[in-house]
Amino acid sequence: MKRTDWRFSGAGGIEIYARQWLPEAKEPRGAVCIVHGMGEHGERYSAVAERLTSEGYAVLAHDQEGHGKSGGKRGHLTSIEAAVHNTGLLLEEAGTRYPQLPVFLYGHSMGGNVALNSALLLKPRINGLILSSPWLRLAKGPNAAMKALARLLVRVMPKLTLSTGISPDDLYRPGYDHAVTFLGDPLCHSAITIRTFHIMTDSGEWAIAHSGELEMPVLLVHGTGDRVTSYEASKEVEERLQERCKFVTYEGGYHELHNDIYATHLLNIVTNWIAKRL
């Protein structure tokens, strides 16, 4: 793969880091913009990018605010609108670089929430939306008392940082040779501010309620063994979209399906689905 890196000014003037992977020996036939999940960064999608570039696609991925090499407090999002705005800038970059090519938006976990909100709020001219284990609800959220306390704290201490409590063992199972680990990666973290938690909770519920308004085709993938985000929430989105959505269930699949033992099958599904929409 060939690659280039750049930075751009995101929402609120925060510097956002981005990279692009390109096919080695041919012109791209489409572009895929990836939005990563909580606590990680775009570089963790290098194996996904390798497969997509081998199929002839340019792949663009930015580090969200508070993540990776981008600016901002670790684990903190200013607002869902800011995250959507930055995703829109990445899509604009893809459109500028490849004005005659189809563009797809691919979001995982927190990035799935941001990607879905981007599709609903920006109504971008893209050829399809791919949602991987989107954080629309958590698999196991806090109880009512904890939620009430959090609502109180977010008003007075919005940047209070907590641990996500996610173990690397919750993300994927060993067995896929090209899995990109979370452990030992200095750009990964387990921090999340209380404001970010509320942003994701509220925007996830809003996105579920409005998902039926999407007009673009959607590929939605989720494992029933996901310990992080809610499979049932994804099922609700599929029921609202009906024939506009291809919903692929992985029985027992963990949260990061692209790193899990189902990864090869998942990437086959993704590349075949994209190819049919060129």
Image (spheres, grey):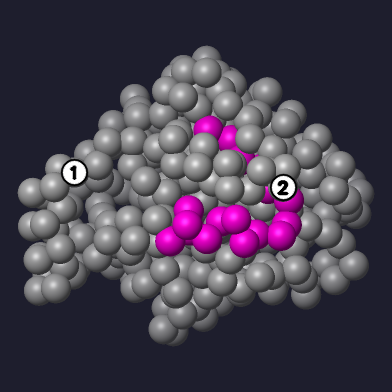
Answer whether residue 217 is magenta in the image: yes
Q: Position of residue 261 (x, y in %)?
A: 55, 19
Q: Is residue 221 above or below residue 156?
A: above
The amino acid pointed to by label 1 is: Pro
Q: Which is more toward the observer, 27 or 131?
A: 131
The N terminus, quarter of image: top right
Which residue matches tag 2? 244
The residue under the point 56% across, 71% down is 121
Can residue 262 be seen in this snapshot?
yes
Answer whether residue 198 is magenta in the image: no
The magenta stretch spans which residues? Answer: 206-222
Question: Which mark is in front, 2 or 1?
Answer: 2
Q: Position of residue 213 (x, y in %)?
A: 62, 61
The amino acid pointed to by label 2 is: Arg
What number is the disc on residue 142?
Answer: 1
The residue under the point 59% across, 35% down is 221
What number is the disc on residue 82?
Answer: none
The residue under the point 86% across, 42% down is 276
Q: Which is more toward the observer, 70 or 127?
A: 127
